[in-house]
Amino acid sequence: MKILLDACVLFPTVLREILLGVAAKGLFEPLWSPRILEEWARATIKLGPGAEDVARGEIALLSANWPKASVQPREKDLARLHLPDENDVHVLAAAIAGHADLIVTFNAKDFPRHTLTEEGLSRQDPDQVLRALFAENPDAVREVINSVHEKAQTLSGETLPLRPLLKRARLPRLAKLL
């Protein structure tokens, strides 16, 4: 299954690490566009000085580790598509160009189901996707979550309870399930 990851699910570090960890286990093939990665880098500016540089380093590593994940939207799709937020047309066009099955985003209102259905796509939030993948492959998903949890604790130098960490990553139902 090919999944296009919107910028809003790549920017939170814990969420990104879980999604890409699950992808690395072979549970889905991630896709994004150069513009999506650029939006992620720009979004980090609000974290303070140096945050954008860190994000750009992470993006370079991501691009090296997933060379086939980057898709370029076609001009003809960009010209013909319409969404409630025109700034999201590039996301839909990238999903089409990459032959994605699904767009993972928190912005449900910006991706109407009827429009996506016409393009052979659907959308889900990360919590839905990860719970479905957990139902199919609980050991693999749990292993990724445990690894990300350990890394977060190591980087913070604190004990971080898993459920609140997942809730902050906007994965409340997955947190409850685990």
Image (spheres, helix red, strand yellow):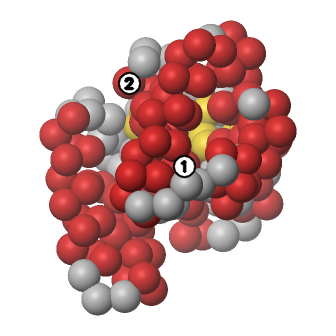
For mark 2, what is the residue? 24
Quarter of the image with the C terminus in it = top right
Which mark, residue 95? Answer: none
Disc 1 on helix, strand or loop?
helix
Please identify the quarter of the rendering in which residue 86 is found: bottom right
> Is residue 35 at least partly visible in the picture?
no
Whole-percent x, y for residue 3 in the image: 52, 32
Identify the residue at image location x=75%, y=37%: 174
Whole-percent x, y for residue 89 in the image: 55, 59
Disc 2 on helix, strand or loop?
helix
Number of numbered discs on residues: 2
Whole-percent x, y for residue 63 in the image: 22, 44
Q: Amino acid at mark 2?
A: Ala
Between 145 and 42, the one lying in front of the other is 145
Disc 1 and disc 2: Cα gap in Å?
A: 14 Å
In the figure, 43 relative to 30: above or below?
Answer: below
Q: Amino acid at mark 1?
A: Leu
Please identify the quarter of the rendering in which residue 30 is found: top left
Identify the residue at image location x=79%, y=60%: 109
Mark 2, Cα crowd under 10 Å, few <14 / some 14-19 / many 20+, is some
In the figure, 142 relative to 104: above or below?
Answer: above
In the figure, 91 relative to 137: above or below?
Answer: below
Between 79 and 126, the one lying in front of the other is 126
Which mark, residue 15? Answer: 1
Tag 1 and tag 2, C-beta contact below 8 Å: no
In the figure, 44 relative to 80: above or below?
Answer: below
Between 152 and 41, the one lying in front of the other is 152
Identify the residue at image location x=21%, y=74%: 53
Mark toward the start of the polypeptide (1 vs 2): 1
**Left or right: 141 with respect to 106?**
left
> Is residue 8 at least partly visible in the picture?
yes
Mark 1, Cα crowd under 10 Å, few <14 / some 14-19 / many 20+, is many
